Amino acid sequence: MTIDTYQDDITWGLWRRRAASDYSADWAGMTGIYRMRTLSELPTGEVDGVSTFLDEGVLAEVVLHIQGQSLLLMAGELYEYPQERLVFKRCDESVLVFTEPSAAESVDWVPERRELAQG
């Protein structure tokens, strides 16, 4: 399974594809800011449960329950501004991953993270 993002008018949401993709050939020889690496900190195994959350009809967050561990996936982006200020933006073009879902509650989100409808 692959989780990606899609653009829905002016906002971005999460999108699930049934089969994982191997992009290694696409990335071979690329230069720039993007890096690929193994994410050994992520849980592996069977998915025991899935919780989905909608923001104005767009799939904004997914919590995967894997082998007793929760993994939060959010459509969003992290921007770095002068004076080393980081801005966490919701419903943007990347997939943000939190191995500890409660950590997302301590972030100052733009726009503000509010109560979402469970999908």
Image (cartoon, rainbow, N blue to C red):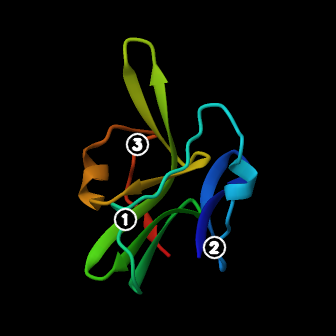
Residue 6 seen in this snapshot: no
Q: Position of residue 82 (x, y in %)?
A: 44, 13
Quarter-of-image position of residue 69: bottom left
The mark closer to the camera, 1 or 3, is 1
Q: Residue at the location (37% across, 59% down)? A: 115
CB contact under 8 Å: marks 1 and 3: no
When the figure is inspected, residue 52 is found, relative to residue 32, above or below; the finding is below
CB contact under 8 Å: marks 2 and 1: no
Cα distance, mark 1 to mark 3? 26 Å
Q: Residue at the location (63% across, 51% down)? A: 12
Q: Is residue 14 left or right of residue 86?
A: right
Residue 112 - label: 3
Other-residue count near label 1 (Cα within 10 Å), few / some / many at <14 / 14–19 / ≥20? few
Mark 3: amino acid: Glu
Of marks 3 and 2, which one's residue comes earlier in the chain? 2
Quarter-of-image position of residue 18: bottom right
Q: Is residue 64 left or right of residue 56?
A: left
Mark 2: amino acid: Ala
Question: Secondary structure under badge 3?
Answer: loop
Residue 42 - label: 1
Q: Position of residue 80 (x, y in %)?
A: 46, 25
Other-residue count near label 3 (Cα within 10 Å), few / some / many at <14 / 14–19 / ≥20? few
Q: Position of residue 48 (x, y in %)?
A: 37, 87
Cα distance, mark 3 to mark 2? 32 Å
Foreground pick, 7 / 97: 97
Q: Position of residue 94 (x, y in %)?
A: 57, 48
Pointer 2: what residue?
A: 20
Outermost residue, top direction? 83
Question: Secondary structure under badge 1?
Answer: loop
Quarter-of-image position of residue 108: top left
Question: Secondary structure under badge 2?
Answer: loop
